[in-house]
Amino acid sequence: MDIRQSAQWGEYLTQIGWKIEKVGSTQIFIRKVPFLPFSFIKIQHPKNPLPFRQIDRIARENRGLFVLIEPDGEGFELSKMSLNGFQKSHMSLTHTSTIYIDITKTQEKIFNSFSENARRNIKKAQKNNLQIKTISLKKEKDDSEFRKFYRLLSNLTHLKKFFVPGYSEFYKKMLAFKNKSAVLFAYSNNIPVAAVWLGFLDDRAVYMNTGITRVGYDLLANYLLVWESILLAKKNKLPIFDFEGIYDPKFPMWRKSWKNFSEFKKRFHGTAVEYPAPYIKYYSKIYQIFDLCSRIFYK
């Protein structure tokens, strides 16, 4: 199951204002347009086959302007999209490509599968006297450790010039995943210099977010934390380490800021996974015209 179809993700989106309709195992996310009697609807990486009839009913009941489906690749049938009124969309709200690492192999085989650059940097980081501390969030009585993680994440956003939501939204996400996640910190001289927030699903560990300082980069803490995260996932007997998104050149305007960290993730090799393109169905002629204008600008 993709993380966006997990119960925890549903709880998180509910806390930040989305309404959820569930059809079988498929979570359908509905967001009301402020001050208007309309809504936007998204379905992200659902299992196939898709419940098109129920999707249509939910869209009409909630006066949806559109439904955006970002399909899962397994069992995907393109013909059913067009038969049910969906067309390819330029809009992408979640990643369309990622990397999976098979962690059922031995620790030695996993390590040797990395690029020479990644292996060398992990070994260098291990010589830099970094201390790795793993925090199981479900055991924490308050959010002090998570605030420490968020400060490192915020520092990364300043270094790399990209946006993340404020702490209030991250706190709600933390609460939703509290029983299913951990934060790994790298310390140098008792100061946290890097961190990874790792989520746990039934069949995978998910690299949710990361944060780092310039000192952390200098000490190659980001490489060591990925390796330690993989070892933790393997200890928990999960078969897949999901890097949760890399840059996809098919959507350059939506993912431009992902280029640098995608190159970092690719150094751990693994299997590239590409999802089908997003598909959209319009329920409003006015919105369809507006979107057509945005497509022309986008091109």
Image (cartoon, rainbow, N blue to C red):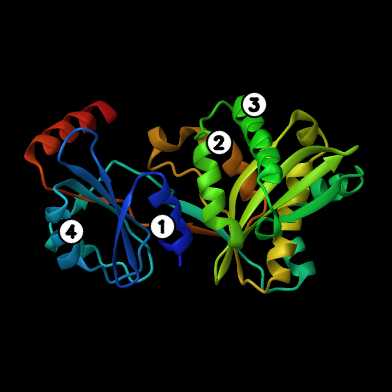
| Kind of residue at disc 4 | Ile
Q: How many marks?
A: 4
The residue wearing badge 3 is 159
Q: Which mark is residue 10?
A: 1
217, above or below 73, in the image: above
Which one is in front, 13 or 41? 13
Residue 260 % position (x, y): 59, 36
Q: CA distance from mark 2 to mark 4?
A: 32 Å
| Kind of residue at disc 3 | Leu
| Kind of residue at disc 1 | Gly
Q: Which mark is residue 167?
A: 2
**Do the residues under discs 1 and 2 have CB atoms within 8 angstroms?**
no
Name the mark nearer the viewer: 1 or 3: 1
The residue wearing badge 4 is 58
Residue drawn 55% across the image and 57% down it: 177
Residue 148, quarter of picture: top right
Name the mark nearer the viewer: 4 or 3: 4
Residue 5 % position (x, y): 41, 62
| Kind of residue at disc 2 | Tyr
Q: CA distance from mark 1 to mark 2?
A: 19 Å
